[in-house]
Image (cartoon, rainbow, N blue to C red):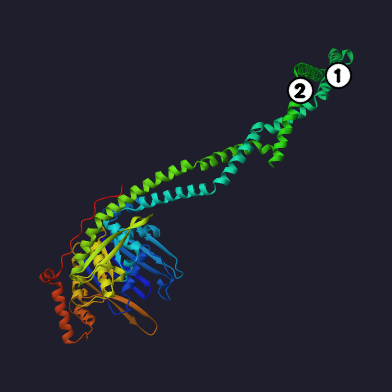
Amino acid sequence: MSLGRIHLRDFVIVKELEIEFSKGFTVLTGETGAGKSILIDALQLALGSRSETGFVREGASKAEVCVEFSPNAALEQWLIESGFDGQDEWLIKRVIEPQGKSKAWLNGSPITTGQLKGIGEQLLDIHGQHAWQSLTKAEAIRGLLDAYAGVDTSPLKASWDLWKANLNTLKDAQAAQSTRQEAHERLLWQIAELEKLSPALDEWPDLNAQHQRLSNAQSLLEAAQSALNALQNDERGALSLLFKAQETLSSSAHIEPEFAPWSEVLAGSLAQAQDAAHSINAWLKSVDLDPEGLGELDARLSLWMGLARRFKKNPEELHTTLLDWRQQLAELSDALDLELLQKKVAEQYAVYLKEAKAVSLSRAKAAPALAKAITLAMQGLGMQGGVFEVELQSLALESSHGLEDVAFLVAAHPGSTPKPVSKVASGGELSRIALAIAVTTSQLGNTETLIFDEVDSGVGGAVAHTVGRLLKQLGVDRQVLAVTHLPQVAACADQHWVVSKTRDANCTWSSVHQVDGVAREVEVSRMLGGEASSEASMAHAKEMLHHSTHPAALAAKTPSVKKPNKAKSKTP
């Protein structure tokens, strides 16, 4: 997996440039301010870093960054699972507007910044020029050791969060015990009062309908009996009169045909009236309008209305109110069960402690190996006899990251006592230690492209030669890109690009071109600080390039940097 090509248009002070990267060790050099680090910024932008308004060249409508890369099998599988079609070559394109907004595509399909970051994490490993600053931060130090040990601390953090959440719940329950007890007792009383009524769902409207019916029982009976009398009263009842009228018309229908339909209407009416009389009579025989039932209804309605007033609820709400109070009582009962809460806290603490001890074991196994590897790298960086130590410091109290802090200690000279890295006196030593760590840890990852952005600041002389040879050695089986100001480092590169700044009356822009042969000798001569065209400076540059790239010389002078064994223990 490696970078293939980067193409920029209207990016910062770049009008347009294109670089094709090869395998091995590549350097970018140029005058201070020429824009060497702009290429690193562009790579980071293409791989998900935040876009800014200053990325668009002044006067341009937009900036474009395109990066071609070839993924390894794991990254390609990740890309395919993310919905992108498999390709031999992959192209990321990101366009930035002057307002800072941006859009990105992978092989022509839209891609999110989160997905770009996912690609970047697997594609590149970037070490910045201020890498030493992270050596003073506890989180970064701990992260380096955990990465070296292959420890995944996310289960530890999750168990810590759950333990703390349960602990806070217990503390809240203990602090509010008296208040919760009062609420518990109040709910018990309220529920007991409502359970005297036991209001059923939709019972209230049915009760009112029954009460209205029973309270008007006598008038209902009288109305039914009166209607029945009017229908059936001997010769003067409605049934008798209807029958007489229908029979009279029917008997004369053979003389006057118009009587026939009238007779049929009356016959229908007579049948309906007879049905009504039968139904009324049946109702009078079966109806139970017991005054005692009315008294029971009165009592239930009175209790219902009294409870509704007492608890300031609408009568129809009492059923759901009782259900809600029962739910609240169950929750309060759980909260009041301090033994159960204490049990949950103890159980989760045990889970956390198991995770923390597993992480501690992995760190304890990895710490000496990491210290040994970095100590070895220091020997070739002008710190002969120096010692690097990784110290695990037990914590008085548990933390989300485990049972210990991690400290990096260094003895820069033979016989000196190891002290915290932050106490090392010189910035040059800090830079070399950071470089030793970068070289050591870079050999552990799966990324095949390593970028070093002026990590050699504060380094010079013979140490600079060593830095160059170390980076070249890394480039044997990796793609290594370094932005440098050191001629000793540049002379070791397999590929050399020079960034230059051009000015005219209207604007300033950066450009980049590959140098080889005499052109490369001229650039190294410039970096040496002499007159680029002087014979002495050119001779020095030519000799440096010869000794830095000649296989025999390289093998003789390059310190051995072995890939440390990765800790095999894993957090269960």
Q: Which mark is residue 292?
A: 2
Task: Say if 68 sits above or below 492 in the image.
Answer: above
- Residue projecting furthest to the left: 552
Using residue 323 as the reference point, say whether residue 557 is left or right of it.
left
Indicate the secondary structure of the residue bearing disc 2: helix
Measured Cα–Cα span from mark 2 to mark 1: 31 Å
Q: Which mark is residue 384?
A: none
Residue 184 at x, y = what percent? 58, 41
Q: Residues within 10 Å of mark 1 (few under 14, many from 20)?
A: some
Give the residue at mark 1: 230
Q: Nearer the viewer, residue 28 or 336?
A: 336
Q: Residues within 10 Å of mark 2 (few under 14, many from 20)?
A: few
Residue 413 at x, y = what percent? 21, 72
In primary-sequence order, the first of circles 2 and 1 is 1
- Please state which amino acid type lies under the numbered disc 1: Ala
Residue at x 59% of width, y 43% of height: 183
